[in-house]
Image (cartoon, helix red, strand yellow):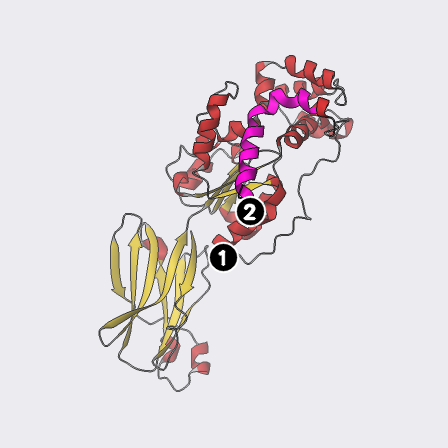
Amino acid sequence: MEISYLYSQNDWKNELYRFHLDVFKKEHGVIKGWLVLFDDSVDLLFEYTTVDGVSKKEKIDFFHFRPKLKEIYPEVEGVEFSGFEINVQELKGFKEGRFLILVNSAESEIAKACVKPPLLYVHIAKTAGSTVNKVLVDLFGKKRSIVHAESVPNWKVKVENDELCYLSGHIPFSVFNESEKVKGFKKAITFREPYSHVVSHLCWIRALSLEVNEERYNSHPEYIQKLSDKLSLVDFSSPKSIEKLIEGLDAVEFRLLDNTQSRYIRKGNSASAVSEKDLEGCFENLQCFDFVGVDKDISNFLKSICDYYDFEKQVDLKMKENVSRNNFGFDLSSEELKKSLLPLIRYDLFLYDSLVKVSNNV
């Protein structure tokens, strides 16, 4: 659980009291703070609501030991016992809380405590996802994060047990969204220009069969190994060679390369080829996402996430992760070569162009 505070800056200190909230620590799940009173007529209330809409209001008792307060306010008797703690883990379904100052029967809001839901990142391979994961795991913390959920059999259990703040994986959105709890997560996804994306995907698979990558090659399933071997025989500088490759892909191989970005976001998890009919479902599912990034502007995508979660982070994309250096002869300045790739990215192109227009406010 992630909680952020919003202060009513004009109300948290005056001649009657001084109010303070400690930085919330997710691992403890406890809201801690203190209230120093210069007038006994002041009370502090905590009013909270749950996800079910239930609202409760309670008076806060002060008895937690805060020894440094005695040094700051030596004139206040018993000030070192002005601390309070609220265990939000015990407030089932806690969504939002308000701290209220009560003076002469008049209430005024002094601060809010708001729950920030966990974040799901649907990681489409080769769309800057390794960089996104690196940045966000550093911010959310390794203990409360899962990347590559497709390799973590119990990720659904961790979700159900509220153990995660960040979830990421090479898993279609429709599969993630089968979990009722994941439906309540904030959602993020990134996309890449389709020509460079499919070339990067092909080169990554092709590179596995290089002698230097023998260990990585052996760690992959047989169908990936066979495809890598097949790609090693292809002249990627030749449009005709690429056309022949695509025509000769079997059903499993074609699924690995067929409009992979649309495949991650379309409705259902069918093995069938992506079609024009799927595009409507893609755009409908995209409405569920709070953060959508494209390769031209990943830094602003990450900044919007950091701003929402109140992370003070300067995003430096010079530290790009998992970048392939070998293009095996691909030349995307060749219109003829790009045309040969079209059967693999026809619908990804339409999806990507639409997203770029939105990001450019066209």
Q: Which stretch appears magenta?
A: 338-362
**Amino acid type for the residue under numbered disc 1:** Asp
Q: Residue 16: x percent and y percent?
A: 34, 80
In the picture, measured across the screen, residue 245 lies left or right of residue 162, that is right
- The image quadrant where one finds the C terminus is top right
Residue labelled with disc 1 = 310
Magenta highlight on residue 194: no
Q: Residue 152: x percent and y percent?
A: 51, 35
Q: Residue at x 67, y 39 (%)?
A: 322
Q: Nearer the viewer, residue 347 or 112?
A: 347
Q: Nearer the viewer, residue 14 or 130?
A: 14
Residue labelled with disc 2 = 301
Mark 1: few/some/many CA within 10 Å (<14, 14-19, 20+)? few
Q: Disc 1 on helix, strand or loop?
A: loop
Is residue 174 visible in this depiction of the protein? yes
Q: Residue at x 27, y 70 (%)?
A: 107
The disc placed on residue 80 is none
Give the mark toward the camera: 1 or 2: 2
Q: Taking 207 as reference, is 120 above or below it?
A: below
* Location of residue 259 by image quarter: top right
Q: Residue 180: x percent and y percent?
A: 37, 37
Q: Nearer the viewer, residue 248 or 32?
A: 248
Magenta highlight on residue 344: yes
